[in-house]
Image (spheres, rainbow, N blue to C red):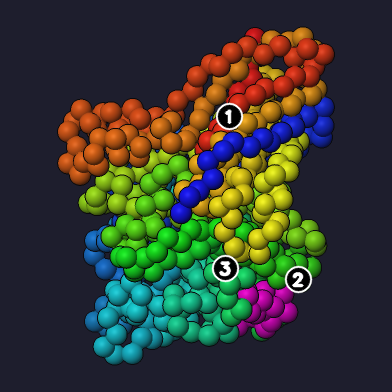
Amino acid sequence: MTAQSNAHNATVTVRLDGSRTPLRRIWRSVGYDEPNYTYTPSGRELLGKLGGMSDAPYFIRCHFILCSGDGTGRLKWGSTNVYSEDADGNPVYSWTLIDRILDATIETGCIPFVELGFMPEALSTAPAGTPYDDPRHGGWRFPPKDYGRWLELIRHLASHCLERYGLAAVSRWYWELWNEPDIFYWTGSSAEFCRLYDYTEAGLHAVLPQALLGGPATTSSALRPQSNQFLRDFLEHITHGVNSLTGQRGTRLDFISYHSKGGGYGVEPNAAKKTPTMRTLLSNVAAGLAVINDFPALAGREVILSECDPDGWAAGSIHDNPNLAYRNSEYYASYVACTANKLIDLRAEGGARIDGMLTWAFQFENREYFEGHRSLSTNGIDKPVLNVFRLLAKLGSVRLPLESNDHEGAKGREETRRGAPDNENSPPDISGMAATDESGGVQIFLCSHHDDWDVDVSTEVSVVLSGLDPNRTYAVQRSLVARGSSNAYTAWLAMGKPQSPSATQIAELRAAARLKTEKVGDFVATDGNGTLAMTLPAHSVCLLQLIPA
């Protein structure tokens, strides 16, 4: 394939004299399958980096925190053994491992987003002989034998958290029932899931009436009609259904959650090239919002994408599918940045909007360097995508109007069908956000993204500003995440891809991963207006900061 390599032009307009609104930091959440990696040294180190962001706190969501087992973490599995039963069938609660997970989250400056799943072995209705801990076919996926005991588990967990962490802390948490019950994560029907939600809501709010509980965390609704229907069935139950405990109409729901992915991969060691697409992710999001808009009684509820990613298989690696190498590079960084730019203003006709997007990526233990898992770091080396969150953290609290006048890019993209990848001959999409802070400084967050990772097109960007303080001088600083810039992966490739790097090489990789910020000049806002010029590589994320002199 011959990818486009010539430059194109774009104009970005930022108006300080336009309407100002609070900046909604919708990106401050991450999650992962393996909860027991939370409290390892590498896990705590990465959580500390998230908790240390200037726009912290970050919310942390994990699978498997109610599962039975000894706490040994592995790909797509984890456990806490929080619930078991003694010889007489009496409940036994154990908080040791779940405390380690929550302690590590809180002590590093993050906030739990507690995913209440999955079914403890002693409560599971799995048929005899079902292996409990199989990551895809295990007994943890089944409804409970006794819904009352499930309620008591949730009530005891809430009581324990209240006692250990205090009301002020626990009141900031989010609680969500299960994960993707419309696919293999739940073997029951949608009606059984709604019943499980009723019991969960009763148990949690009996102890913490102010707790925020949501769901149903279903999969991408535009790709799977049954997922769309599951979300609809759940919201119908919430608004008009009969509560399984009270017999009354409706059940309390504090926020609505579902998931969106931009593509999917399977185990294909010799797979042909296939890229995620931004259109697929956005069409999935729009389909979910359309369902939510059909329930006016839920207007004003937060809508959270409790997983929002380029694809749906974080634990896969380049050994499973060579396409997953993109997760090591600046491509993954620009995809996440573009997602944030697109979602912050996406709103359905009836008004529903996205209030949160959770990146399903963390870190994996005892894996190769840059093995292609969807992660924020690899063996303690930050990937380029983590620097996107560092750039976003630098945005001020007040949002400014920003428009990207990308005519060539828009034309090329309109000619492709919904969900299709960008044509290799179309230029990258240029998107962004702008903000200001209490000092009068201006921050401009820009992203260049193309669905095809082989496209190598630079964009000459003119940033036109209006409404600045007349004749004031600003120092202009630039931070760039791109190939060869704030990018440990390109440094690792240049080293020859070492899997046992020396101490010197590790230090060099850490240095290459560090977000670089440089002063590129001074800017005088003549008559309060002015233009900045810059070049954005095809897959790149940039922050321009105008600092008043």
Residue carrying label 1:
535
Tell me which residue sits at (48%, 58%) in the image: 275
Which amino acid is tagged 2?
A: Phe
> 490 and 151: which one is in front?
490
Q: Position of residue 413 (x, y in %)?
A: 67, 54
**Residue 405: % across, % down:** 74, 39
Chain-order first, disc 3 or disc 2: 3
Nearer to us of marks 1 and 3 is 1
Residue at x 25%, y 35% (from the top left corner): 495
Quadrant position of residue 530: top right
Q: What is the crowding at mark 1: few (fewer than 14 residues within 10 Å), some, or many (at least 20)?
A: some
Q: State whether the magenta stretch is mostly helix, strand or loop.
A: helix
Residue 295's label in the rendered image is: 2
Instruction: Say what secondary structure mark 1 lies in.
Output: strand
Separation of disc 1 and disc 3 at Cα?
Answer: 35 Å
Q: Earlier in the sequence, mark 1 or mark 2?
A: 2
In terms of depth relative to the viewer, which is nearer, 183 or 327? Answer: 327
Q: Which residue is mark 3?
A: 220
At 17% across and 41% down in the image, what residue appears? Answer: 500
